[in-house]
Image (spheres, grey):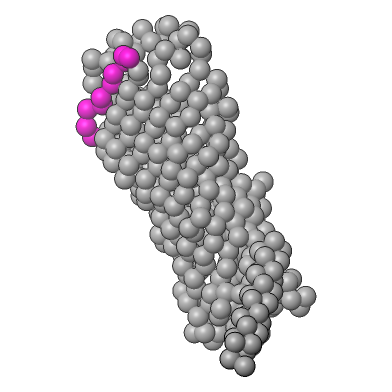
């Protein structure tokens, strides 16, 4: 089977295969592939593929149809390992990514439909991704992926719930207070996200997560599984006092959120998202605060002893 595949690739290596690729995508998916420039293909010593100005349109959406735009896509795969060991060893690079995430008529976003996840987030993602991995099948290959990603989401909206309400509820759990009443507000929940990090064994690890909403800054770190889309983040939210008139925050809420003092654990998977107090981070904060207080007392004692 692999020999037949390579023979076919030899036949098309010298041709402009744009029409072949676009027809194949149209036959087996709901997407329409457009490639503006000739595709570069090389077979030896490794299979190499380079595509510039690639666009994938979602035919289930009336307008705008454009789902994915990639300025430069590059793939390299070891022909030797594919033939002799039936193993995929692949390097991929996606430059100038532009994903337009929209809701489809079947009430699932085009990104969720493509990746078989349930994020219920719409918006526009731009950035750059580098991946490399090896495996005997798609599952083992995905679980072994390594690389790097630098991504930004603009005009984002979470269709499941109100982010501010979830943050306030997580705080109330930690404070052992009643859940805050849901506030009907006219302020938009539209947000942006910037994140950068490494990919290790199929998990994207971000130490620099920044999310911005009106009057709100959320920062943190966490992991996202490339296998099933599950994620686990520890974040801190700082709310500007101008948001108080919109959400009708209590004095205690305003105090806690104005300095971002309460770590919140945000986890997602199997179609659900939870916001809870991050007990590990809270404990770490308390330990660090205790050590700092003890250190300050020791410094004061030494200073007084020297002066007296």
User: Can you tell which quarter of the image residue 235 is in?
Assistant: bottom right
Residue sitting at 45 percent across and 10 percent down? 83
Residue sitting at 26 percent across and 35 percent down? 52
Residue 255 located left or right of residue 219: right
- Decide whether the magenta segment is chiefly helix, strand or loop: loop
Q: Residue 243 or 66: which is nearer the viewer?
A: 243
> For the C terminus, which image quadrant?
bottom right
Residue 157 located left or right of residue 268: left
Q: Residue 233 or 181: which is nearer the viewer?
A: 233
Name the spot of residue 156 as percent of width and height, x first: 46, 60
* Count of marks placed on residues: 0
Q: Is residue 281 above or below residue 17?
A: below
Residue sitting at 39 percent across and 32 percent down? 92
Per the image, is 67 magenta?
A: no
Q: Can the viewer see residue 154?
A: yes
User: Can you tell which quarter of the image residue 43 is in?
Assistant: top left
Q: Can the viewer see residue 168?
A: no
Q: Is residue 53 above or below residue 6?
A: below
Q: Is residue 269 above or below residue 179?
A: above
Name the spot of residue 267 as percent of width and height, x first: 64, 55
Q: Residue 200 or 188: which is nearer the viewer?
A: 200
Residue sitting at 32 percent across and 42 percent down? 95
Span of residues in magenta = 36-45
User: Can you tell which quarter of the image residue 90 is in?
Assistant: top left
Name the spot of residue 230 as percent of width and height, x first: 61, 46
Per the image, is 41 magenta?
A: yes
Residue 175 located left or right of residue 195: right
Name the spot of residue 132 as percent of width and height, x first: 44, 32
């Amino acid at each position: 089977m692999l020999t037949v595949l390579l023979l076919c690739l030899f036949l098309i290596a010298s041709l402009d295969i744009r029409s072949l690729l676009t027809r194949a995508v149209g036959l087996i998916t709901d997407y329409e592939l457009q490639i503006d420039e000739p595709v570069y293909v090389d077979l030896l010593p490794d299979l190499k593929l380079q595509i510039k100005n690639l666009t994938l349109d979602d035919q289930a959406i009336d307008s705008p149809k454009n789902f994915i735009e990639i300025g430069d896509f590059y793939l390299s795969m070891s022909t030797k390992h594919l033939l002799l060991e039936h193993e995929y060893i692949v390097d991929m690079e996606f430059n100038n990514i532009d994903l337009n995430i929209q809701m489809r008529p079947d009430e699932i976003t085009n990104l969720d439909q493509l990746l078989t996840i349930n994020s219920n987030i719409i918006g526009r993602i731009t950035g750059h991704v580098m991946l490399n991995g090896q495996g005997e099948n798609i599952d083992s290959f995905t679980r072994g992926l390594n690389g790097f990603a630098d991504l930004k989401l603009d005009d984002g909206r979470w269709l499941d719930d109100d982010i501010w309400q979830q943050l306030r509820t997580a705080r109330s759990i930690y404070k052992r207070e009643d859940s805050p009443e849901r506030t009907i507000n006219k302020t938009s929940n539209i947000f942006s996200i910037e994140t950068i990090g490494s990919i290790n064994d199929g998990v994207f690890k971000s130490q620099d997560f920044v999310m911005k909403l009106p009057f709100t800054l959320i920062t943190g770190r966490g992991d996202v599984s490339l296998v099933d889309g599950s994620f686990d983040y520890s974040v801190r939210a700082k709310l500007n006092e101008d948001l108080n008139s919109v959400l009708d925050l209590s004095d205690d809420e305003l105090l806690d959120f104005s300095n971002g003092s309460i770590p919140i654990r945000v986890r997602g998977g199997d179609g659900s998202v939870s916001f809870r107090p991050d007990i590990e981070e809270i404990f770490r904060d308390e330990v660090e605060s205790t050590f700092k207080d003890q250190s300050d007392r020791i410094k004061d004692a030494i200073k007084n002893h020297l002066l007296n």
